Image (tube, rainbow, N blue to C red):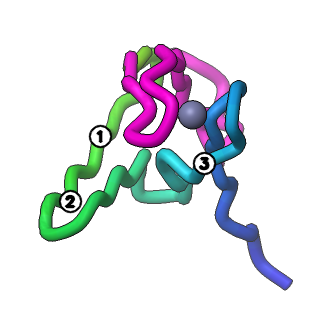
């Protein structure tokens, strides 16, 4: 059934912080939306709910071998 979106949640309070799909890592909060693309990317996000710092890594959906 295709590749489901991977939800990235706060490690502390389990709030939804971002979604990881084939197009990249999508962060949406209110009217702000950001999409981060890249293979080797690390994003630090402060949880909007509990203020704890979460480090998110988009996992490449397409497992192509890195050139
Ligand atoms: Zn949290």
Looking at the image, do the residues carrying marks 1 and 2 touch, with CB atoms under 8 Å apart?
Answer: no
Residue 63 is inside the magenta segment: yes
**Residue 16 shown left or right of residue 5 in the figure:** left
Q: Mark 3 points at which residue?
A: 15
User: What residue is shown at x 35% (from left), y 51% (from top)?
Assistant: 27
Check disc 3 and report its element: helix, strand or loop: loop
The residues bearing labels 3 and 2 have C-alpha atoms spaced at a distance of 16 Å
Which residue position holds label 1? 36
Q: Residue at x 77, y 78 (%)?
A: 2
Label ID, residue 48: none
Q: Residue furthest right?
A: 1
Q: Give the CA distance from mark 1 to mark 2.
A: 10 Å
Q: Does the residue labelled 2 lie within 8 Å of ligand 1?
A: no
> Which of the labelled discs sits on residue 33, or is there none?
2
Q: Quadrant of residue 36?
A: top left
Q: Distance between the residues labelled 3 and 1?
A: 19 Å
């Amino acid at each position: 059934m295709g590749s489901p979106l991977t939800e990235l949640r706060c490690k502390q309070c389990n709030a939804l912080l971002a979604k990881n799909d084939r197009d990249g890592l999508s962060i949406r909060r209110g009217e702000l939306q950001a999409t981060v693309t890249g293979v080797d990317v690390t994003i630090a996000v402060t949880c909007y709910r509990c203020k704890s710092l979460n480090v998110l890594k988009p996992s490449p959906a397409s497992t192509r071998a890195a050139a």
